[in-house]
Image (spheres, grey):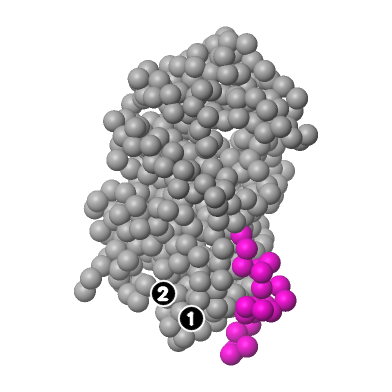
Amino acid sequence: MNGLPGAVFRPGDEGYDEERRGFNLAVDHHPALVVGATRAEDVVAAVRYAAEAGLGVGVQATGHGPAVPADGQLLISTRRMVGVRVDPVARTATVDAGTRWADVVAAAAPYGLAPLNGSSADVGAVGYLLGGGLAVLGRRFGYAADHVRRFEVVTADGELRGVSPESEPDLFWALRGGKGNFGVVTSMEIELFPVATLYGGGLYFDADTAAAALHAYREWTGTVPEEMSSSVMLTRFPDLPEVPDPLRDRYVAHVWIAWSGPVAEGERWVQPLRAAGPVLLDTVAEMPYREGSTVHHEPTTPLPTYDRNTALGAVDSAAVDTILELAGPEADAPFLLELRHHGGAYARPPEVPNAVAGRDAAFLLFSVSVLDPDRIAEIRGSHDTLHRRMHPWSTGGVFLNFLGIHDTGVESVRSAYRTADYERLTAVKAAHDPGNLFRINHNIPPAAA
């Protein structure tokens, strides 16, 4: 169709609805055209076609990340571009555009290596990394975007470029943290790390113990070494058969643990949390790294979700009390709340600088709701209240990958970056995409001429 290779779908075509839908069903795309790319040349053709036709370009692999619908525009689906090639000697992996982290983890595991994947192995590797990437091993090694060697990317001029610190330093800097604003990444070469096992799992405290557990968790995070990654989630589990009996239809404070050092040492570090009170369920144990996604047990069924986040500095007992007031057992909050521990390697600048901010955060506060169309105003208001009330402990920043469907404006995106970095990003955008072809995203507009 019009010289476009690969699978091409228009409204009304068989397969169009399946192709346009992603994981977050709150984003209901109705693009004018969907290109199901199978190789880099398909992406080149799609970008050139969009530029000639005056269409904006959006990109979707698994669909966890998109927050802006590509209505009337061109959507490139990369989910057919799947592949991982591991170099165990160099400790690197080359990952194609539509690959999920589960496939990268599985390919690296036979060599005793691990990538810097996130808590859900179902997420697309490229989109996650371009937004920074909060890794299971992040406190030990940093953001996923800190450990990229090279990209293959199609830029707004329709050219396929090899981008590295040596070949395109400004573009390489911007891609790592600038999300999809600077081109369509068709593959990336990333570093792997010698981690074969985790001491990980969950400690589940009931409503009566939640406050003590959350206060204990705050104090504990001030003592742990960088090999310890963790978070605490406050939620009510549904009354469903797939939920373990001890948790079904219960309010729970769920502390997840991912320790990548010696098991015996990890057991000693977890003991103070176990002593915080009786637990409903304790699943913390040694496991192969490839089973690490079981720690969070994130959903794999597509859902319409609403997300908000705030980066927090020092969190004191008053901050914990505020969280409990708004999301504790008596609050009946319409959202799940997670407090994720940062610091460690997250706080250190990478060897090759990038655009990822948030290095001053001690924690990330993240809230998510399954979106009920009849309760949108109520749900949004509850999130607004939570994040407004937590402002005294905020760094003023947010994390780009967790910005949701109502955080797509310029000021929301700007808050994900340091001021100087945001200005540099707009300058790089002006140099490589002056017409803002890649605008179906949390957009960074080009600097004015």
Give the CA separation, mark 1 to mark 2.
Answer: 8 Å
Question: Which portion, as a residue range, is magenta?
Answer: 1-22
Q: Is residue 134 magenta?
A: no
Task: Give the left or right position of residue 352, taking residue 212 as reference.
Answer: left
Image position, residue 379 (x, y; %): 48, 43
Q: Quadrant of residue 197?
A: top right
Q: Which residue is mark 1?
A: 50
Looking at the image, is mark 1 or mark 2 earlier in the sequence?
A: 1
Q: Amino acid at mark 1?
A: Ala
If the image is split into quadrants, where does the N terminus sit?
bottom right
Is residue 403 or residue 118 the one in the foreground?
403
Q: In this rendering, is residue 181 above or below 320?
A: below
Q: Which residue is mark 2?
A: 437
The majority secondary structure of the magenta stretch comes to: loop
Q: Residue at x 51, y 71 (%)?
A: 71
Q: Amino acid at mark 2?
A: Leu
Image position, residue 36 (x, y; %): 64, 73
Q: Residue at x 35, y 62 (%)?
A: 444
If the image is split into quadrants, where does the C terminus sit?
bottom left
Label 1 with label 2: CB-CB less than 8 Å: yes
